[in-house]
Amino acid sequence: MDQQSVNVNGAVPKYSEKPEKFKELDFKRWQQKMLFFLTTMNLAYVVKEEAPKSNENPMMKKTVIAIEAWNHSKFCCRNYILNSLDDNLYDIYSLCKTAKELWESLEKKYKIDDVGSKKFVIGKFLKYTMVDSKSVVSQVEEVQKLIYELHSEGCEINEHFQVRAIIEKLPTSWNDFKIYLKHKRREMNMEDLILRLRVKNDHRKADRSSSQCKLC
């Protein structure tokens, strides 16, 4: 145990803001916030390390102080985690006797769910296809949101791939412009691509308005 993590009397630092209650959504985000909170309280080590063991003379002052400090920290840590769970989850996980057991039980349950969530987001990204009935710019924003979700799930996608993916997803009426973008020698970043799409989108709108005026 890191002896600097607790005071000799087992006291923890002044209270800092706790994360919102976990309601079985976005476990990874909640876990990171909870771990940060526990770190600010000097309690994060309790969910990672084993309890200190007594030596040959369990009545030695240092041993007694260390065990008392650990037990106090374990009690606080366990209850901080429990109180950051939705009421239904509190009832289930209050059966866990230690903070470490509680933390590992939550990980075992919800990290598996996060894997399923990651696959779902990947599927949405791969299947997303732009259509002519909606603004291309607004659809690019939807793709960017999916990319953000992928990043939050731990699937990092470099900018070059993002640009190429958006070009591939352009609707069929944009095929000529898609070919033009593909054959550009200088690599574009996302900002360049969005600027070009906005300009092209404005030109298409102007052309449609001009055609309608001529018909009138």
Image: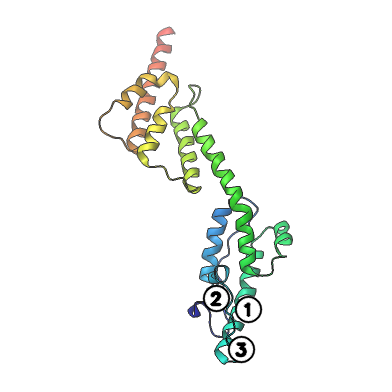
Q: Which mark is residue 71?
A: 1
Residue lying furthest left: 185
Query: Count the marks: how many?
Result: 3
Front of the two marks 2 and 1: 1
- Residue 121 is situated, as x and y percent measured from the top left of the image, at 54, 40
Residue lying furthest top: 215
- Residue 105 is situated, as x and y percent measured from the top left of the image, at 64, 60
Q: CA distance from mark 1 to mark 3?
A: 15 Å
Lower position in the chain sequence, tag 1 or tag 3: 3
Callout 1: SS: helix
Q: What residue is pinned by disc 3?
A: 58
Q: Amino acid at mark 3?
A: Pro
User: Mark 1 touching mark 3, by CB under 8 A?
Assistant: no
Callout 3: SS: loop
Task: Evaluate whether residue 123 shows in this view.
Answer: yes
> Quadrant of the rendered structure where residue 51 is?
bottom right
Task: Evaluate whether residue 21 shows in this view.
Answer: no
Q: CA distance from mark 2 to mark 1?
A: 19 Å
Q: CA distance from mark 2 to mark 3?
A: 31 Å
For the point 63% across and 58% down, which residue is it? 106
Q: Which mark is residue 14?
A: 2
